[in-house]
Image: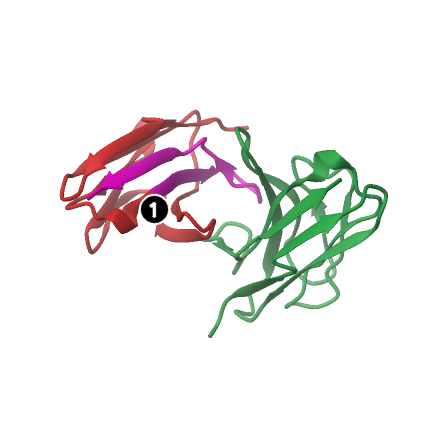
Chain colours: A red, B green
Amino acid sequence: GIQVEQSPPDLILQEGANSTLRCNFSDSVNNLQWFHQNPWGQLINLFYIPSGTKQNGRLSATTVATERYSLLYISSSQTTDSGVYFCAGMEYGNKLVFGAGTILRVKS
Amino acid sequence: IAGITQAPTSQILAAGRRMTLRCTQDMRHNAMYWYRQDLGLGLRLIHYSNTAGTTGKGEVPDGYSVSRANTDDFPLTLASAVPSQTSVYFCASSSNLHSEQFFGPGTRLTVL
């Protein structure tokens, strides 16, 4: 099965700063998702992005499937962006394989 | 509001007891899943169902069983709980096996 690696493992930002989170996967995927797990434990869908680029407000994501990576961009970070960011890939079938996550802390 | 609900929110359980975690979705999704989240291990798939009446094993199925009697409900049962099943359990659903998955709020289970 695929392996999913995320970097950096943790990140501290000053409010207003921008950041890029990276997700590498070991094999081709036909489903790539980004999630935000907030401090209350909820998993919030950010992007479903097997390939290409999508934007939603201050967040955007790019997946280059042929090079087996995805990037999540956070611009003008806010304290409410704090939490853990997961990427997860699905090779085939049913199982989403999650990375270990990036812990983000945004300081005011 | 459309979405996934899970019950209970949290539970403390004595080892050896039977427990059923409930999951209901109202999005008419065909596929449903159960994951567990443990520190340092991320989320791992326990069981899944691609449509009502069918189920399959995920990465860590031992000690758990599921049923899918209808489209909306996907209960997870621990027949005889053990402390290693202490975890946060998430239910998820998607329109089919290959599409975007959406997660419920989770159940925090502690087995003593």
Callout 1 amino acid = Ile
Give me the chain letter of mark 1: A
In the displayed structure, B48 sits above or below B85; it is: below
Say if residue A91 shows up in the picture: no
Q: Quadrant of residue B7?
A: bottom right
Quadrant location of the N terminus of chain A? Answer: top right
Relative to the observer, which residue lies in front, B46 or B6?
Answer: B6
Say if residue A108 shows up in the picture: yes
Q: Residue at x 52, y 60 (%)?
A: B95
Relative to the observer, which residue lies in front, B34 or A93?
Answer: B34
Mark 1, other Cα within 10 Å: few <14 / some 14–19 / many ≥20: many
Q: Residue at x 56, y 53 (%)?
A: B106
Q: Which residues are magenta?
A: A83-108
**Residue annotated with mark 1:** A49
Q: Secondary structure at mark 1?
A: loop
Q: Is residue A55 magenta?
A: no
